[in-house]
Amino acid sequence: MSRYIASDDLRRTNQKVDVSLLSRSIAPEAELKELSCVAKWCCWLFAYDDALDHNYFKGKDAEREIYRDEALRCAHHSLLDENGGDHDPAVVAPNYTLAQGLYTIGSEIRQAVQQPLLRELICESICRFIKVAVDGGATCNSGEILDLDSYFTNRMETSGVYPSLWITLSAIRIDLPDWILGHELVKQLMHQTNIMSSLENDMLSFVKEIKHGHIESYVPILAHQKALGAQKAIDETAALIHTSYLKFGHLEDELLQLVPDEQKDETCRLIRACKDFRTGASSWHYKTSRYFAGLDNQVQAITVTLEDK
């Protein structure tokens, strides 16, 4: 997938993600072929977002729109178009090879996923990520600082958690009927997984973002809006993560009470996939040089304990 990343700088930055570690961490049940697709997606996700974070499109509104629109076309054509997989990516996205890379990922998913609803959910979540990430990048480059609620709403899309979760579910070959897969309780489970993962990422990536001149992160916006000190803002963010964890447990119970006995085992796999994603992403943060360069020899083991209080 790195061959679709045109910039040497972005390619070097992407290597710090360690997509092999990340994909195995968030999708431990996936077999090698499907895991490869998850890794390609992770590589693409970070490369696409980093181009925006690194101000490649600052003052280039027309180019930014093309960057967005070509990626949207590639997502739709590869996953949902009747001729999906039969288009020439270079024709669909003549300007950005990274968009062409997304087309190859979408085509691979399309061939593997037979359930139309799952393909639709994957495509819709990818497209929401693209739209909000690109348009949000334009807002940041304009100097506008969002209020906390607006930032949080956008963050739920720019985190990339939703498409990553759906792709992970496809990678472990989840087999559930449409009424369960599209149920509101499943959406809420994924939402809580997103909250926990996104807020933790905001805390752990804060130093990296500041280096690139970005302050659009939950902790500094919270501190500014509520006139809090840095530690108090971090404490409140951590409390939100804990609250989300408790909500996840309640939603898990509700979903298992709802589904019939013959669907319980597969529903448990879906729930476990959300938990694996959450704990895997957390562990990956501490092990990747993207956020903690130079600390490899200082970190021997990581244990995460979640307790009800």
Image (cartoon, rainbow, N blue to C red):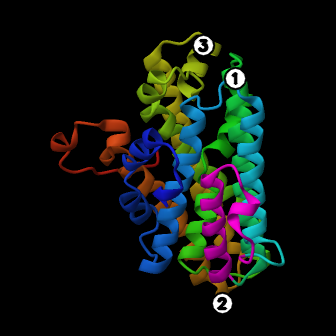
Type of amino acid at the residue the image marks with label 1? Gly
- Can you give x and y, in whole percent of width and height, for residue 238 in the image? 48, 34
On the image, which quarter does residue 111 sit in?
Answer: bottom right
Crowding around mark 1 (Cα neighbors within 10 Å: few <14, some 14 to 19, many 20+) is few
Between residue 109 and residue 284, name the one nearer to us.
109
Q: Which residues are magenta?
A: 85-113
Residue 117 sits above or below residue 66 on the image: below
Residue 28 sits above or below residue 227 on the image: below
Look at the numbered disc 2 and give the secondary structure of its residue: helix
Q: Residue furthest right?
A: 82
Q: Is residue 95 left or right of residue 242?
A: right
Between residue 141 and residue 28, name the one nearer to us.
141
| Spatial separation of the CA atoms under disc 3 and disc 2 | 50 Å
- Can you give x and y, in whole percent of width and height, for residue 127 in the image? 74, 54
Q: Earlier in the sequence, mark 3 or mark 1?
A: 1
Circle 2 residue: 262
